[in-house]
Image (cartoon, rainbow, N blue to C red):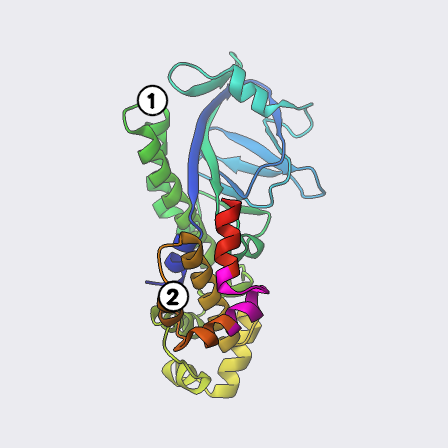
Amino acid sequence: MDPLSDIFLLLRVESVLSARLEVRGPWAMRFSAYQHIKFGGVLDGSFWLWGDGAQEPTKLEAGDFYLLTRGQPYSTGSDPALETVDGREILETHLCADGVVRYGTEGERMSAAGGRFVFDDHTCDLLLPLLPPLVHIPAASESAAPLRAVLELLRLESEATRPGAPVVAAGLANIVLMQILRAHLASERRMPGWLGALADPRIGSALALMHGDIARQWKVDELASAVAMSRTTFTEQFKALVGVPPLSYLIAWRMAVAGSALRAGNRSLSDIAESVGYGSDAAFNSAFKRATGTSPGRYRLRDDTAA
């Protein structure tokens, strides 16, 4: 499995396609803080999106997709100069029987579908800090072709309530997130951390090797040779792109995988230790405590108590 799929699965994504919104005439709505990521796709028309800070408003056209990743309040509307109303209240009070939120009766129509992604709190730091506050994928960009296909599915799925709707909505939302991340990786903007490093042919290949065999006792020389680089150049470039040296990244990823297994609670400590490359419980205990500040046993117990 590739690193992006690995981490996506570890995040335990809960995706919700919340609503289809259709508005007419002048409008502006403000939405309060949210958890993790909001997403949306513009089906018809256009609108502006802006945050509470100094960031300039962004105009979204038909076919565009976006992610909001900081959890901060934001606004949308036909004109950023308009006074906003409470968006959540509009969504609640104007929800029609077919599942579509309709607001306004005259003027040009704007239609969009969207929702949010919530991640396991233990692992959300693997992704969220690496993303800019707004990821905007214009419909005209070369990397947006798969999203254009998904947009038609969103249109069909959000225009009426059908049997199995929650299952289909979750599947579509996950596809949207993955395709937006792919499109963003394909853009010229260099992203920080492992996510941006995936776009580099050699460092991305090294990450794939480590993720492909997490339990292997990798050496820096081995990884450098596998991607046709000298040890020094490989180490420097890996650290520059990922933010940490190769083996530090490998240990951090092992601990993330081990932590997920411990929270699941259905495997022995010895089995988890072996699966992430530690030949003894003592070595695993020592490494896990250095990384998390607590022993594997206490970590599992604490999580069970919290649950």
Kindly tell me whether residue 122 is visible in this rendering: no
Which quadrant of the view contains residue 175?
A: top left
Q: Measured along the vertical axis of the image, is residue 75 above or below residue 103?
A: below
Dot 2 amino acid type: Ile
Provide the major secondary structure of the magenta segment: helix
Could you tell me residue 92's position as x and y percent? 52, 19
Residue 105 lies, with reference to residue 146, above or below; the image says above
* Image-quadrant location for residue 164: top left
Residue ID for mark 1: 161
Residue 293 lies in the magenta stretch:
yes
The x and y percentages for residue 99 are 40, 20
Mark 1, Cα crowd under 10 Å, few <14 / some 14-19 / many 20+, is few
Magenta-colored stretch includes residue 56: no
Residue 272 numbered tag: 2
Q: Position of residue 267 (x, y in %)?
A: 35, 59
Amino acid carrying label 1: it is Thr
Instruction: Give the CA distance from mark 1 to mark 2.
Output: 43 Å
Camera-side residue of 21 and 285 = 285
Foreground residue, 270 or 261? 270
- First reached walking from the N terminus: tag 1 or tag 2: 1
Seen as rendered, the residue at the extreme left is 163
Horizontal side of 54 relative to 257 (left or right) equals: right
Q: Is residue 106 above or below residue 137?
A: above
Look at the image and give the residue range highlighted in magenta: 286-297
Residue at the image position 57 percent from the left and 37 percent from the top = 59
Q: Quadrant of residue 83?
A: top right
Which of the numbered marks, if any, corresponds to residue 283? none
